[in-house]
Image (cartoon, rainbow, N blue to C red):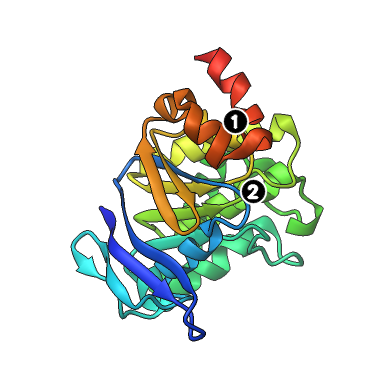
Amino acid sequence: MLELQDVSAILPSGQKIFQKISLTLQPQEICGLIGPNGAGKTTLFSVILGLIPHNQGIISLNGLNLSWLSPEKRMFHGLGYLPQDGSLFHELSVIENIECLLECKEPHLSRTERRHKIAKLLDDIGLQDVSHKRSITLSGGQKRRLEFARLIAIHPKYILLDEPFAGVDPRSIEEIQEHIQKLKSYNIGIMISDHNLSATLNICDRVHVLVDGHIIASDLPEKIIANDTIRTIYLGNKLSDQLIPHTQAC
């Protein structure tokens, strides 16, 4: 389990970013982190990853205290991250984008073993037909799938996805939702932060609502949607309107 216990963060200027944030993420769980612009969602991801220090509380992964570990060591222990602007090497092929990670993560594998592992992974995620194309030539949806493949290749236990639905068309959003759900079959826990609330909530098992550096609610998606106060006051009309299609589907 990935767990935050009473985590607080304060900037050198004295500005409080978060106060006593507590939340959990279980294996094979998809958890949403939602809130209005400026709520601190991406910043909270940075705190979890160790990119921004916290001054109080504990961040742990399967019982291991990560609080004072570097971002690299947190990744080594199973914390994965997909940033909004992506992480691909555009001039490398699909295969090479994955292979360069495997060379670092599993240097004991032979080239043949790496290629066999990559072929199976690309088949699972539906990129086998473009395996030799440069990543810069891929569609938005294909690039997202390649980013997922790169994450899966290094065996993370938990993944933070920052705006995974940004910059892709509606059809690709459905494909990305399917592939995020497939991550659960690898025993991975996933936390999503995205402005597309409908796309996010449709695949979440649980949702945390972050407002002004505080978690104001943690519940099932349908209960968050049914809460008029959260929808209208904390999320605002623009974000609230996105929830209508999801509500009707339920």
Do residues under tags 1 and 2 come within 8 Å of each other at their CB atoms?
Answer: no
Q: Can you give x and y, in whole percent of width and height, for residue 85 in the image?
A: 68, 60
Q: Can you give x and y, in whole percent of width and height, for residue 211 in the image?
A: 49, 51
For the point 54% across and 18% down, the residue is 247
Pick out the residue farthest to the left.
Answer: 63
Pick out the residue farthest to the right.
Answer: 137
Viewer can see residue 84:
yes
Give amino acid for label 2. Answer: Arg
Using the numbered discs, state the Cα–Cα distance from disc 1 to disc 2 in whole angstroms.
Answer: 18 Å
Judge whether 241 appears above or below 86 on screen: above
Q: Which mark is residue 198?
A: 1
For the point 49% across and 35% down, the residue is 230
Judge whether 157 appears above or below 199 on screen: below
Disc 1 element: helix
Q: Quadrant of residue 75?
A: bottom left
For the point 66% across and 33% down, the residue is 237
Judge whether 5 appears above or below 34 on screen: below
Q: Which mark is residue 144?
A: 2
Q: Is residue 203 left or right of residue 57?
A: right
Q: Quadrant of residue 248?
A: top right
Q: Residues within 10 Å of mark 2 (few under 14, many from 20)?
A: many
Q: Is residue 89 left or right of residue 15?
A: right
Q: Can you give x and y, in whole percent of width and height, for residue 71 in the image?
A: 43, 76
